Image (cartoon, rainbow, N blue to C red):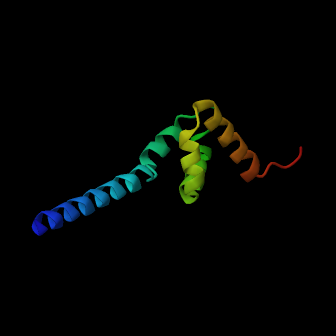
Amino acid sequence: MYEDDGVEKLSKTIADVVFAIQNLSKNQLDVNELYTKVMKIEGFDEITLGDAFDHLVQHEMLAKAFMTKNANFRKIWVQNFVNQHYYRPDC
């Protein structure tokens, strides 16, 4: 009887650990997928997109938000990134 209780507790503990690991892995940033999505954005050169990718990798919360956006919002994000991070002298 007591052995069954111990096995049940162990089983429950293992299930809790598995659940926690699954939740952690769901929240991980997939850098390869991020790179693919960034580089697919049209209208920007490869260097600019690479800079945007590097910025996102350094700021994980921004990257996660970027990944949830649709293609139009991702393009707007890159345009805003360019406007904020690239020097453009008034001509």
Q: Is residue 57 left or right of residue 87?
A: left
Name which residue lies at 33% across and 54% down.
19
**Image quarter of residue 61:** bottom right
Count of numbered tags: 0
Residue 61 against residue 82 in the figure, above or below: below
Residue 9 seen: yes
Residue 36 image offset from top left, x and y in percent: 47, 40
Q: Is residue 24 left or right of residue 5?
A: right
Residue 74 against residue 88 in the figure, above or below: above
Q: Residue furthest right?
A: 91
Q: Is residue 69 left or right of residue 20?
A: right
Residue 79 image offset from top left, x and y in percent: 70, 40
State the residue in front, 21 or 4: 4
State the residue in front, 88 or 78: 78
Residue 1 image offset from top left, x and y in percent: 10, 65
Name which residue lies at 72% across and 43% down.
80
Residue 50 seen: no
Name which residue lies at 56% across and 59% down.
58
Q: Is residue 10 left or right of residue 32?
A: left
State the residue in front, 70 or 44: 70
Name which residue lies at 68% across and 37% down.
76
Residue 16 image offset from top left, x and y in percent: 31, 59
Looking at the rendered image, the quarter that the C terminus falls into is top right
